[in-house]
Image: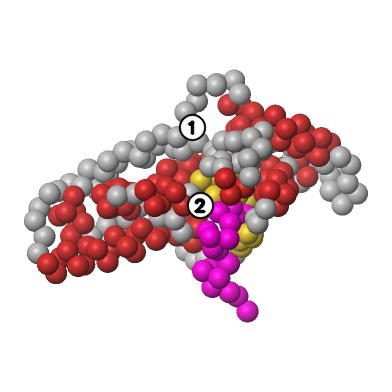
Amino acid sequence: MTSARRQLIDANATPFYHVINRCVRRAFLCGEDKLTGRSYEHRRGWIVDKIKTLSAIFCIDICAYAVMSNHYHLVLKIDVDKAKSLTQKDIISRWCQITKGHVIATKYMNGDALIDGERVLLDGLITEWHERLSSISWFMRCLNEEIARKANREDKCKGAFWEGRFKSQALLDEQALLACMMYVDLNPIRAGIADSLQSSDFTSIQERINSLNSPNHPLTLPVPQTDFSTNEAYIPHKSLVQFDGAAHLNEQTGIPFHFADYLELIDWTGRAIRLDKKGY
């Protein structure tokens, strides 16, 4: 029997979670369909672009990711402090970049006076949207729905694209976080589709290594204000969570390891020979 997400995801227990979702169809999510010979490699970029866009809107950061041929892995961090710091206008602006919002919210953002009933309605909407902006379930819903729509449109078909609800796992301590991030980053190598970290396309470890050549790359990009007359805005990507060093899990804002140590460990682990994995 499945459990409610509110029972599986609790930011008070840990902000870090590993999530995975799998494609239901014979045709791969990404990669090449061996039956038809058609390539779906471009869909990997869809997923990476979307998680970066959603991370800039939600109070949810990306620690690690790997987009495989028929599934993807994410290691997410709920930014509780960011969620607490949002003003009412911040909440409305962010949420209206995901959905059409509500006419009352548009009226408020345009500076129009609200009557008492509208104020009560707006307060309820803001409370609801505030909760959703730090919800992994809503983050995944927005991600999966858009990818499914684009894939269905490209395939000229209808129906379920994903196997079902995404699976999630709480990462309760530093050891669990470290092991899970390495598992995610090493997925292409263990699957035999890459022979090095640098060649592991559409993974966070490849992105981090490449970013070493561009040290001026910003940690985060500002979320733009939405034009409420059109409800449109350019939404920049948000960078991966940074490594903070050897701080305690509950006392840091990023990943509690030094990146140099992580890189050395994951490189050594990836070279280890395992009888149950292809590796390199």
Q: Amino acid at mark 2?
A: Ile
Under circle 2, the secondary element is strand
Distance from Cα at disc 2 to Cα at disc 1: 16 Å
Quadrant holding the N terminus: bottom right
Q: Is residue 14 magenta?
A: yes
Task: Look at 35% across and 39% down and name the residue there.
Answer: 223
Please provide percent x and percent y for residue 137. 49, 61
Q: Amino acid at mark 1?
A: Leu
Q: Which residue is mark 2?
A: 78
The count of marks equals: 2
Please provide percent x and percent y for residue 131. 39, 61
In the depicted structure, whether residue 119 falls above or below residue 82: below
- Residue 43 visible (yes or no): no
Please provide percent x and percent y for residue 246. 66, 37
Task: Look at 21% across and 56% down and name the residue there.
Answer: 105
* Residue 277 placement, left or right of 129: right
Q: Is residue 42 magenta?
A: no
| Residue range of the region highlighted in magenta in the rendering | 1-23
Task: Look at 48% across and 49% down and name the residue there.
Answer: 79
Question: 73 or 31, which is in the foreground?
Answer: 73
Q: Are marks 2 and 1 in contact (CB under 8 Å)?
A: no
- Residue 4, quarter of picture: bottom right
Task: Look at 46% across and 59% down and name the residue there.
Answer: 135
Q: Which residue is mark 1?
A: 219
In the depicted structure, whether residue 217 falls above or below residue 76: above
- Residue 77 visible (yes or no): yes
Please provide percent x and percent y for residue 115. 9, 64
**Which badge, 2 or 1, comes first in the chain's sequence?**
2
